[in-house]
């Protein structure tokens, strides 16, 4: 039987169906019939398996399409959220930039005001110091009644307040020089006696 089956299979493989059908013995025809029956069952099983696989693939395809739709929907939502986040970030960045530029402007304004205040304070303190020094220098020249006494007092004061001395004061020397020149002019013009 195996040899007949082998012959039938060999004939089938060689595509000699017609030869077996026309010239074949009853046994070969029976074997061919049995083989065709088995082959038909096998093909039916494969067909049913293919149909089952087709149904499975269709279900997977449908599930995949559903998942893709969900993913696309989530992607659209995420893109919208991302755009909103970018817009929000841009607004925050704009606010920060405006804040920093305002801070910089305020800092510059404050620096100008500070410099102006320091200049005013310096001028005011210089004026106060000069007034004090002038009053002190006038007091130091008090009691001078001649040009000779003026010159002697001037030399003594310069020795005391010269900047090279330990207790020297440059501003006081300038004030003493100014007052000396004023008093000297007064004596030369004859205003003082």
Image (spheres, rainbow, N blue to C red):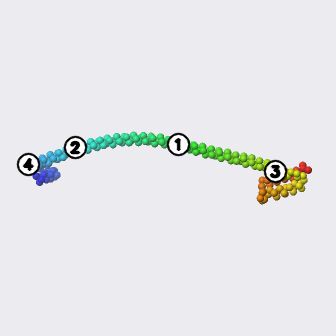
Comes first in the chain, label 3 or label 4: 4
Residue visible at 10% across and 50% down? 28
Residue sitting at 73 percent across and 48 percent down?
A: 122
Tag of residue 92:
1
Element carrying mark 2? helix
Q: Secondary structure at mark 1?
A: helix
Q: Earlier in the sequence, mark 3 or mark 2?
A: 2
Identify the mark at residue 26; answer none if there is no mark.
4
**Which residue position holds label 3?**
136
The image's mark for residue 48 is 2
Q: Mark 1: give few (<14), some (14-19) or many (20+) Cα within 10 Å.
A: few
Q: Secondary structure at mark 4?
A: helix
Left/right placement of residue 96 relative to residue 46 reads right
Viewer-side residue, 109 vs 160: 160
- Label 1 and label 3: CA atoms lie apart by 63 Å
Alpha carbon separation for disc pair 3 and 4? 155 Å
Q: Please state the horizontal and vertical placement of residue 86, each as a whole percent of the image.
A: 48, 43
N-term mark: 2 or 4: 4
Q: Can residue 179 be seen at all in this image of the molecule?
A: no
* Quarter of the figure with residue 150: bottom right
């Amino acid at each position: 039987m195996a040899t007949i089956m082998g012959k039938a299979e060999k004939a089938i493989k060689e595509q000699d169906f017609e030869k077996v059908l026309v010239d074949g013995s009853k046994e070969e025809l029976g074997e061919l019939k049995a083989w065709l029956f088995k082959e038909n069952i096998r093909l039916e099983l494969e067909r049913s398996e293919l149909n089952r696989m087709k149904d499975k693939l269709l279900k997977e395809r449908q599930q995949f399409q559903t998942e893709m739709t969900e993913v696309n929907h989530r992607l659209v939502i995420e893109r919208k959220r991302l755009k909103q986040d970018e817009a929000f970030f841009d607004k925050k960045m704009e606010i920060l930039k405006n804040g920093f530029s305002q801070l910089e402007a305020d800092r510059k304004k404050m620096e100008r005001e500070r410099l102006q205040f320091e200049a005013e304070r310096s001028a005011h303190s210089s004026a106060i110091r000069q007034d004090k020094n002038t009053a002190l220098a006038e007091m130091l020249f008090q009691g001078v009644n001649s040009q000779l006494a003026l010159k002697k007092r001037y030399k003594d004061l310069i020795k005391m307040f010269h900047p090279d001395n330990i207790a020297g004061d440059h501003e006081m020397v300038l004030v003493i020089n100014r007052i000396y020149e004023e008093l000297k002019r007064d004596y030369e013009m004859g205003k003082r006696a």
